[in-house]
Amino acid sequence: MQLTTLLIPLTLLTFPLAHAAEVKTEYTLTNTCTRKTQRGDNIEVHYRGTLQSDGSEFDTSYKRGQPLAFEVGKGMVIKGWDEGLLDMCIGDKRKLTIPPAFGYGDRAMGPIPAGSTLIFETELVGIKGVEKEGKKEEL
């Protein structure tokens, strides 16, 4: 009986902490399509990454003229991308606000300080084996 009494308050205390740090997704351009991104898809994404703290840009694929290609949902990129780029149509654009727990955590990574919240403006350029379809809906 006493153990149950102790566990309930601990559970209530940790619940908000576990759910406080989530990826925030802002839909900036959406398309209608029948085939959206799913785990295991090979996708191509253009992006611009900035630090939430001061707005400084730390990386962008646009300047290189080459989108980043990877298999989504398989741990090849930060967790915030693996989750934030699912259920997208080709041509969709999203702004992802990624807290440290879904980015690089307490590790510094090049120009990104440890514990940084990251902002990514993303554009799904392609899904391997899927043709672009649908209409744009500006948001």
Image (cartoon, rainbow, N blue to C red):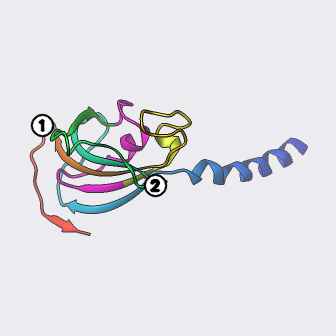
> Does 65 lie within the magenta span?
no
Q: Amino acid at mark 1?
A: Gly
Residue 82 location, x and y as percent? 37, 40
- Image mark for residue 54: 2
> Does 87 lie within the magenta span?
yes
* Residue 124 position (above or below residue 69): below
Q: Secondary structure at mark 1?
A: loop
Q: Amino acid at mark 2?
A: Asp
For the point 17% across and 56% down, which residue is it?
A: 33
Q: Nearer the viewer, residue 4 or 106?
A: 106
Residue 30 location, x and y as percent? 23, 61
Q: Is residue 46 left or right of residue 133?
A: right
Q: Is residue 32 left or right of residue 101?
A: left
- Image mark for residue 129: 1
Q: Residues within 10 Å of mark 2 (few under 14, many from 20)?
A: few
Q: Nearer the viewer, residue 2 or 71?
A: 71
Q: Nearer the viewer, residue 9 or 136?
A: 136
Q: Residues within 10 Å of mark 1 (few under 14, many from 20)?
A: few
Residue 23 location, x and y as percent? 45, 51
Magenta residues?
73-95
Residue 88 location, x and y as percent? 26, 51
For the point 42% across and 38% down, which residue is it?
A: 111
Residue 80: quarter of image: top left
- From the image, which quarter does the C terminus lie in? bottom left
Q: Are marks 1 and 2 in contact (CB under 8 Å)?
A: no
For the point 50% across and 34% down, which residue is it?
A: 108
Whole-angstrom CA distance, mark 1 to mark 2, is 39 Å
* Residue 12 position (above or below residue 70): below
Q: Secondary structure at mark 2?
A: loop
